[in-house]
Image: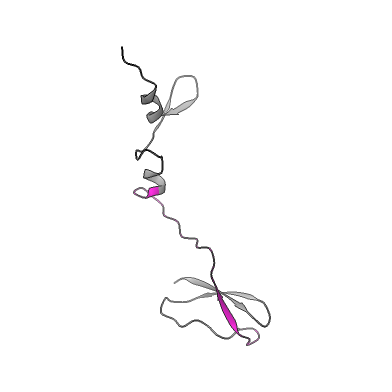
Amino acid sequence: MPVYEYECLSCGKVHEIRQGFNDEPLNECPDCNGSLKKLISMSSFVLKGSGWYKTDYASGNGKKTENKDNGNGSRKDKAEESTHKTSV
């Protein structure tokens, strides 16, 4: 169930209330019985794992990049490595 924030217009307290999606919004402050205003807050929803834009497609060229050790202790992307190869 999601958590919603309400601010009391009388006492100024902010309450975090767990409610179902279909529940009616609260109207009365549990502390002072004043009027409540539902707040819009930042979501903490995060997509994890593979298959999401952030993890698989955000590299700019639509390809996953892999890091490869180039022998001197520094690392470079596989995509970067392929652009620096020259033909003989």
x and y percentages locating residue 8 in the rendered image: 63, 80
x and y percentages locating residue 80 in the rendered image: 41, 28
In the rendered image, the residue lying farthest to the right is 11
Identify which residue is drawn at 49% across, 19% down: 72
Q: Quadrant of the N terminus?
A: bottom left
Instruction: Depth check: give the residue in front, 27 or 16.
Output: 27
Above or below 63: residue 15: below
The image quarter containing residue 59 is top left
Is residue 14 found left or right of 62 in the rendered image? right
Specify whether residue 35 is painted magenta. Answer: yes
In the rendered image, the residue lying farthest to the left is 88
In the rendered image, the residue lying farthest to the top is 88
Identify which residue is drawn at 38% across, 49% down: 53
x and y percentages locating residue 42 in the rendered image: 53, 63
Specify whether residue 6 is painted magenta. Answer: no
x and y percentages locating residue 70 in the rendered image: 44, 22
Is residue 59 found left or right of 41 in the rendered image? left
All told, the count of numbered labels is 0
Q: Specify the principal SS of the magenta part.
A: loop
Instruction: Depth check: give the residue in front, 19 or 38.
Output: 38
Task: Tell me which segment is drawn in magenta.
Answer: 30-53
Above or below 34: residue 45: above
In the rendered image, the residue lying farthest to the bottom is 33
Identify which residue is drawn at 41% across, 52% down: 48
Instruction: Depth check: give the residue in front, 69 or 39.
Output: 39
Q: In which quarter of the image is the C terminus?
A: top left
What's the image's color scheme?
one colour
